[in-house]
Amino acid sequence: MANFIQTTRSKVNLDDILDINCYTTSDKSIGKIELYSQSMTDQYHIDKSVNTVTFEVIGSINENKLEEWLQELLWEKSIKNKNGKEMNIMRMKGLLCIESSTVKVILQCVNELYELIPTSGWEENEEHINRLVFIGVNLDRESLLMSFNTFTKQ
């Protein structure tokens, strides 16, 4: 449960808001991504132009190629939907299996900013999978999946 902090003119003790690990990546947060993406198909929000798309790709991916894909998608906006429209990614979360890493990697993205965060290791018999959840405008699952596979499997 969230704690409420009463302030006067936005003055607050920095110890109350810094280094409290609200966005740490733990097995619990990985489980939430897995649970959320498994229960979803393409969904729409109150604003009908905003929708949610998810997909999974089995296997390991190349980190450099992943970075190229993220930059093309988020910064260059060169990956279009099936109607040729620009896809506007508002939020993206992912659980990734990077070739050069022995640990799971969490992807956090807000608009054009993204971060790759190493987390816990893969279990011995655990399937190595890449699971992504997108929230945005003009999203097209097939275009996102095809571009992801094209870039990361080169």
Image: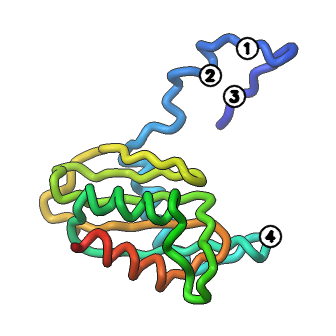
Residue 88 in the image: state x and y as whole percent: 62, 66
When asked about the image quadrant of residue 72, the answer is bottom left
Q: Give residue 77's mark.
A: none
What is the quadrant of the C terminus in the image?
Answer: bottom left
How far apart are labels 4 and 3 at the CA level?
A: 28 Å
The amino acid at mark 1 is Val
Tag nearer the camera, 4 or 3: 4
Question: Counting residues from the N terminus, which is met first, the one under dot 4 or under dot 3?
Answer: 3
Task: Report which residue position mark 2 lands on.
Answer: 17
Mark 1 neighbour class, 10 Å CA radius: few under 14, some 14 to 19, many 20 or more? few
Question: Counting residues from the N terminus, which is met first, the one under dot 1 or under dot 3?
Answer: 3
Check whether the beta carbons of the residues at disc 3 and disc 2 lie within 8 A of each other.
no
How far apart are labels 4 and 1 at the CA level?
A: 34 Å
**Protein image colouring:** rainbow
Name of the residue lying farthest toward the right: 9
Residue beneath the point at 21% across and 66% down: 60
How far apart are labels 2 and 1 at the CA level?
A: 8 Å
* Left/right of residue 51 with respect to residue 69 in the rendered view: right
What is the quadrant of the N terminus in the image?
Answer: top right
Question: Counting residues from the N terminus, which is met first, the one under dot 2 or under dot 1?
Answer: 1
The amino acid at mark 2 is Ile
**Dot 2: what SS?**
loop
Residue beneath the point at 41% across and 79% down: 145
Residue beneath the point at 59% across and 84% down: 84
**Dot 3: what SS?**
loop
How far apart are labels 3 and 2 at the CA level?
A: 10 Å
Task: Report which residue position mark 4 lands on.
Answer: 46
Residue beneath the point at 37% across and 73% down: 148
Q: Which of 99 and 120 is in front in this view?
A: 99
Check whether the beta carbons of the residues at disc 2 and disc 1 lie within 8 A of each other.
yes
How far apart are labels 4 and 2 at the CA level?
A: 31 Å
